[in-house]
Amino acid sequence: MKGSGIGGQAVMEGIMMKNGDRYAVGVRRPDKEIIVKTSEYPSYIKGKKVLSLPFVRGVFNFVDSLVLGMKTLTYSAGFFEDEEEEQKPEKEPSKLEKKLDAFLDTKKGMDILMGITIAISLVFSIALFVLVPYFASTLLKKVTDNMTVIVTVEGILKMIIFLGYIYAISRMKDIQRVFMYHGAEHKCINCIEHGLELNVENVMKSSREHKRCGTSFLLIVMVVSVFIHMFVRVDSRALGFAIRILLLPVVAGVSYEFIRLAGSSENRFVAALSRPGMMLQHMTTREPQAGMVEVAIAAVEAVFDWKKFLNENFDAHYELTEREYVCGEFLVREGGRLMPIEAKETLDAKVKA
């Protein structure tokens, strides 16, 4: 698999795709028309050598992704807020509402709103995934002084809360559609990175698992935090919580480096470590509809020349008619059953035969 360098995320009834500093948001409007907006979002770390160092860059890339993700999600939601407003009976807005709307229409207003939203999201995440499991585990001090047991229970509680949260939101109807677009995003990237022409048929047959997924990143964050806290221990509850907050950039930096390595490595050990995150993606992605794939393709083509990428990195491109791509592996149908293809030369020979 050849890395393309593109990534993205699902938004409301659409997909955001990013390539370098350029990104595109493709949205299927209520009238079924596909709208694609392209813009630039320069990274905070661009051109700053000290901030491009391993482990440091992960923290800033995480912040970049969070801000851009919130920005594009807000943009996509605007299409459906307008529709809801049109369906409501006309009502004269108050002076306060007029001033607030006018303020939010400015860049400064939107930046402030974005900052408040991100801050609230971070506080909620820290409270749910850090504070709750930590303080719950410290209750064990009433029955044991064994810090290994206490930290282990904290890690178990953290994983249970995380997986439970993922499962709970995956049951929500609106989120399920977002997860279908998430699946379309993965399928598009997999289609390109395996040398296939970007069309609806090829994308639909591609895998919805990808090593660089944010779901995998979050799972790695949980696992890395458990291991780090095994070695960084204090007796004070307040100090213990403070240390967990201060170590969050370290956890994010280590996790980012692993995801970066996994996305560019074919090492079997790295692949094995990536499997739990890819399996978890079956909860955060769904099989998309063809119309969703069309939106994803439109977003990709707005910022990425996939034809040039294929010509530069692959000798030939195939339609998924003689073979199938399942769970990160190429397979070819022989005698009514699927058999793995380990080398591209073998694949070529099978197709030509």
Image: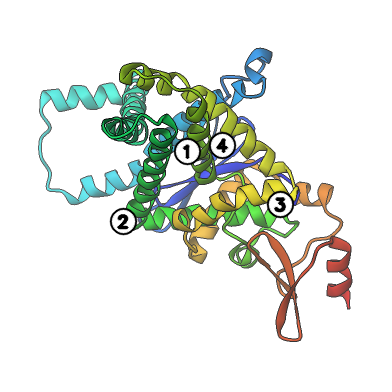
Q: Amino acid at mark 3?
A: Glu
Check residue 193 in the rendering and tell me which mark sits there, or answer none. Answer: 3
Neighbourhood count class around disc 3 (C-alpha, 10 Å): few under 14, some 14–19, many 20 upward: many
SS at circle 2: loop
- Taking the spot 19% from the left edge, 22% from the top edge, the residue there is 99
> How is the structure coloured here?
rainbow
Q: Is residue 343 above or below residue 300?
A: below
Residue 181 visible = yes
Neighbourhood count class around disc 4 (C-alpha, 10 Å): few under 14, some 14–19, many 20 upward: many
From the image, tell me which residue sits under label 4: 23
Q: Amino acid at mark 2?
A: Met
Q: Are marks 3 and 2 in contact (CB under 8 Å)?
A: no
Check residue 172 in the rendering and tell me which mark sits there, or answer none. Answer: 2
Question: Which mark sits nearer the N-terminus, 1 or 4?
Answer: 4
Q: Nearer the viewer, residue 317 or 95?
A: 317
Q: CA distance from mark 3 to mark 2?
A: 31 Å
Q: Nearer the viewer, residue 263 or 135?
A: 135
From the image, tell me which residue sits under label 1: 222
- Quarter of the image where the C terminus is located: bottom right
Q: Quadrant of residue 111?
A: top left
Question: Which mark sits nearer the N-terminus, 1 or 2?
Answer: 2
